[in-house]
Amino acid sequence: MSPDLELFDYLFSKCLEITQETYDYLPAENDPSYSYPFIHVGNVTENGAVTKTSHSASFSIVIDVWGTREQRREVASLADKVYWLGGYPFETDNHKFYCRLDDQQKQIMIDNSVANTVYVRGMVTLRFYLEEEK
């Protein structure tokens, strides 16, 4: 399996451990099957470098925590737990990933992109590096 898919699956499973309200899509506004706050595991971006003798890559993934404006404390707490997923190296079935905390970002912001609605959004950007295979 490709490293980006294994990274996504690993982080999705870790977010499910944080809360069962974890999705790989943004639920529709009128969808009764979800509740706030929830985690949305988003896009993975790969930046690769290939030479004659090696392949290395870094991966960025954006994970959002969404809540109502009254849930700022809960959103911040969940975003902090997501942020620390980028604090430790780990292995998947086929790859080893490591990270540096100075490459991680966390923002808590107000989102009013939906008319007449105010949400609190915790946006966490994690960067992982693929350990070069020997």
Image (cartoon, rainbow, N blue to C red):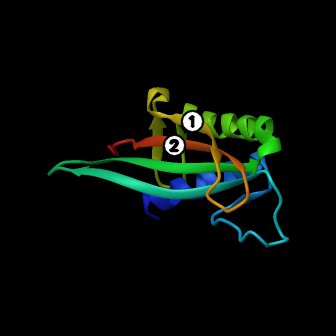
Callouts 2 and 1 close, C-beta under 8 Å: yes
- Amino acid residing under circle 1: Lys
The image quadrant that residue 23 belongs to is bottom right
Mark found first going from the N terminus, 2 or 1: 1
From the viewer's perspective, tell me whether residue 76 is left or right of residue 103. right
> How far apart are the alpha carbons under marks 2 and 1?
6 Å
x%, y% of residue 49?
Answer: 24, 49
The residue identified by callout 2 is: 125
Residue at horizontal 55%, vertical 40%? 90
Residue 115 x, y percent position in the rendering: 68, 62
Kindly state the secondary structure of the residue where label 1 is placed: strand
Percent x, y for residue 83? 61, 36
40 sits to left or right of 37 = left
Q: Which mark is residue 106?
A: 1
User: Does dot 2 land on a helix, a strand or a loop?
Assistant: strand
> Dot 2 surroundings within 10 Å: few (below 14), some, or many (20 or more)?
many
Extreme left residue here?
A: 52
Tell me residue 30's x, y (percent): 79, 72
Decide if residue 105 is on the left or right side of residue 82.
Answer: left
80 and 115: which is toward the camera: 115
Q: Mark 1: give few (<14), some (14-19) or many (20+) Cα within 10 Å.
A: some
Q: Quadrant of residue 2?
A: bottom left
In the image, residue 3 sits, relative to residue 85, either above or below, namely below
Horizontal placement of 63 versus 54: left or right? right
Residue most extreme to the top: 102
